Image (cartoon, grey):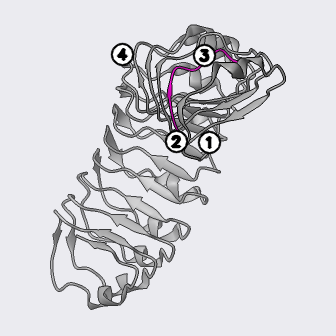
Amino acid sequence: GDNALTGPVPSELTSLANLAILWLYNNQLTGAIPELGTSLIALDLSENGMSGPLPIELPVGMNALLLSANEFTGEIPEDYGNLVSLVALYLDDNLLSGIIPDTLAALTSMIDLRLGGNSFDQSTFPSFVLDFTDLQVLRLQQCNFTGPVPVTLSNLVNLRQLWLDDNALTGATPDLSAATELTILRLPDNQFSGQVPTYLESLGQLVDIRLGNNLLTGVIPEFIGNMVQLQLFACQGNQLTGGLPETLTNLVNLVVLDVAENPLGGGITENIGNLATLSELYLNGCQFTGPLAESIGSMSNMVFLD
């Protein structure tokens, strides 16, 4: 993987009867996936230009099928439910459509599931993923889902990453208070309502929180400033009020802070200069008053200030 290979994947690979792992990610390969040998357990063709329908007949012992960022079309084959050894399935950022098959419910060993960035024809959250209790990564961004997230998402206590960006999900943000290893929480561009969830304070591994462009109300909680591991905090485009908590200046690892397009007010504290690692600061479209903090001039890593 990670070269500049071009053209189709040779069909002659089928003759490699003992081939178990095939990594050809991040090249410029095109065409359809050829028939694969029965010994294959891991295939990575991510980040190429491959097209056509997804292959239906795959070795039943596969544990990793990684096809992200190609141009595959059609539906996810129901037969993928027979691949019960799969722990990683990456089909995100393709041109897939149709319904996510319920047969995938049989993949109970799944650890990393990525289906986002397709054009599925279903509007409901795929409830079968709620039974994948070993799941660590769930990426379902840009899937056209509507309505509330099932409350039983809270059962996924092993989650490290949750991406639900750019759907039309409604109701309260999902309760992830038991997912104590969560590092990335991405919920922007939905219709979530309520306040910034208080359980975030107890998730000490979070480095990336994205809540932008929802219907959140209330204030930016003071406890955000206690999450010193945070590198990105974005809550732009909501209906948050009050001011910037002084505690935010404790976030010494913060790289991006985006609170734009909220009815926030008050002044900008001089202590914002404590955020030495900050490279992007978005304050536009708010109601801040008073002078611009002079300490911003000492933030040598700043590359974007709005």
Tag 4's secondary structure?
loop
Find the distance from the CA under tag 2 to the CA under tag 4.
21 Å
Instruction: Write down the residue under mark 1.
Output: 159
Amino acid type assigned to the residue bearing label 2 in the image = Leu
* Label 1 crowd bin: few (<14), some (14–19), many (20+), radius 10 Å: many
Instruction: Write down the residue under mark 2.
Output: 162
Asked if marks 2 and 4 touch (Cβ < 8 Å), the reply is: no
Question: Range of the magenta residues?
Answer: 28-36
Find the distance from the CA under tag 4 to the CA under tag 1.
26 Å
Tag 3's secondary structure?
helix
In the figure, is residue 215 to the left or right of 272? left
Q: Is residue 33 covered in magenta?
A: yes
What percent of the width, then of the height, locates residue 209?
Answer: 45, 55
Question: Mark 3 or mark 1: which comes first in sequence?
Answer: 3
Outermost residue toward the right? 18
Q: Is residue 169 covered in magenta?
A: no
Camera-side mark, 3 or 1 = 3
